[in-house]
Amino acid sequence: MHVVVVTIGSAGDLFPFLWMGRTLRARGHRVDFLAPVQHEPWVRQAGLDFHGLPADPAVLDHPDLWHPTRGLAVVWKATRPAMIEVPTFVDALDPDEPRILLVHPLALPEAQLCRDTQPLMKIAAAYLAPSNLPTVHDPLLLGPWRVPPWVPHPVRRLLWRGLAAALIDPVALPDVNAARAAAGQPPVKNLIRYLSHIPDLSITLFPEWFAPTQPDWPRPLLRCGFPLYDPAPDAAPSPALEAFLASGERPVVFTPGTGNRQARRYFEDAASAARELGLRAVFLTPYREQLPEVLPAGTLWQDYVPLRSLLPQAAALVHHGGIGTTAEALRAGTPQLVVPLAHDQFDNAARVEALGVGMSLHARRLNAARLTQALRELLGREAPARRASEVAARLAAPPDATALCLRLEFLLSA
C-alpha cells in the first residue's frame, strides 16, 4: 500500500503523523511524508521518506498568531504556500496506482483536488484534537466562549454558522475557491460543511474517554488513542537537569509550547509565581531570549526535554493546552494548569477540568497574582493528583496500531 502523509504546523502537529507513518512503514507499506522543511531531521530520524514543504518561520512572530479569534487566519495563510505544493507532488505519481492520502484537516481542500485527478485515491483525515471536529453537542466552545448546556441545538447551529460566516469563511474560501476555479471545479460556500464531506475515513487521535463520539461527527470514523510519539525515547537528560532534579523537591514545569516565541510576559509571571510560592521550577522553551535575564533561585531553563521523561518527576505542569502536551501530562499522571491562548487549547482545557486532573486560567487574564493563586490552589489540593494518577492508568498501553493499519488497508481495498 502506498500512503502519502501530509501535515503542517509545529512539533505537536508533526509527532502524531510520525507515529502513524512509522506504524504503516513497520507493516511493510510505502510511506511518503510531506511536512514543513524544518521538520526534516525528525522525519529522517523516524526512517521515513521526507519531502519538504515551504514554511516561513516569521509567522511565529505574527502578533495575531496566538489571538483567540484572529489566530486561525494567521495559521491558514501561513499554510497555503505549503498546501499548494501537495497537488503538484501527487500529480507526479502514477495515477493508476491505488494510494491513500493521510492528511491534516487543513490539507483537505488540496486532497480533494488530488482525488479529482486520481479517482483510485482514498482520503483519510486525522484529527489531533476534539475541537477539530465541529459539533453542536457538549462541551461546546466557540473559540474561548463556552455555550451553556441549556442552549438548544437549533440555536447552537445558528451560533456555529454565525461564527463560520464571520471568522472562517471570509479567510479560507477565497483561497479554496481560487484553487477550485483553476481546476475547473465549482465554488463552495461553507468551509466546515465542505471539509466534513471530503474524507473517505476520519480518524480521531484521542480516546473515547477524553472526548466521546458525537452524533454529528463525520462517518465512517475510526477512534484511536493518543499517539504519544517520542523522537528520542532513550535520550538521557542533560547533566544540568539530572543534577537539578536530584537536588530537591519536585519542580513545577512551565512551557507555552515549542512554537511560541511570544511568551515573555508568560515567563515573567511564572518567575514571579515561583518566587512568591518558593517553588522549584523548570522553564521549557527553545527561545532563551524570552525569559527574564535573571531567573529565580531554584529555577532551571531547558531548551527541550522530552515530557515523557520529565513529567513523572514534576509536581505540576503549567502549559498552553496543546493536545500533545495535554496528553503527555495525562500519561504521566501530572496535575495540570492550562493557560489557553488560541486554536484547540480552550477545548482541551475544558476537558482537563472535566476529568478533574487540573485547572485552567485564560491567558488573556493571566498575571502574576492570578497565576500564583491558581498554583497555590492546584498544589494545595489532593484531588487533582489522585485523579491524574487514575487517568494515567488508562494510558498505560499504547493505542492499537494494528487497528489503524487494518482500517486503512480495508479502505483502499474496498
Image (cartoon, rainbow, N blue to C red):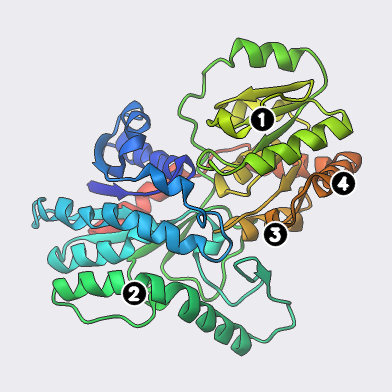
- Placement of 208 over or under 266, stated as above or below: below
Of tags 4 and 3, which is closer to the observer? 4
Question: Residue 265 at what x, y percent from top left?
Answer: 67, 43
Nearer to the camera, 313 or 364: 364
Q: Amino acid at mark 2?
A: Leu
On residue 373, the disc is 4
Q: Residue at x 66, y 30 (%)?
A: 283
Q: CA distance from mark 3 to mark 2?
A: 30 Å
Q: Amino acid at mark 1?
A: Phe
Q: Residue at x 62, y 75 (%)?
A: 137
Instruction: Look at the numbered discs 2 and 1 and tell me whether their residues touch, using CB distance below 8 Å.
Output: no
Which image quarter holds the C terminus? bottom left
On residue 80, the disc is none
Question: Residue 97 at what x, y percent from top left?
Answer: 12, 53
- Local packing at callout 2 (Cα closer than 10 Å; few below 14, some 14-19, many 20+) is some
- Placement of 237 over or under 358, stated as above or below: above
The residue that disc 3 covers is 350
The residue that disc 1 covers is 283
Question: Residue 124 at what x, y percent from top left?
Answer: 34, 59
315 sits to left or right of 413: right
Name the image quarter holding residue 34: top left
- Local packing at callout 1 (Cα closer than 10 Å; few below 14, some 14-19, many 20+) is many
Name the image quarter holding residue 183: bottom left
Q: Amino acid at mark 3?
A: Ala
SS at badge 4? helix
Q: CA distance from mark 4 to mark 3?
A: 19 Å
> Farthest residue toward the front?
293
The residue that disc 2 covers is 173
Q: CA distance from mark 1 to mark 4?
A: 19 Å
Q: Earlier in the sequence, mark 1 or mark 3?
A: 1
83 sits to left or right of 352: left
Question: Residue 318 at what x, y percent from top left?
Answer: 71, 41
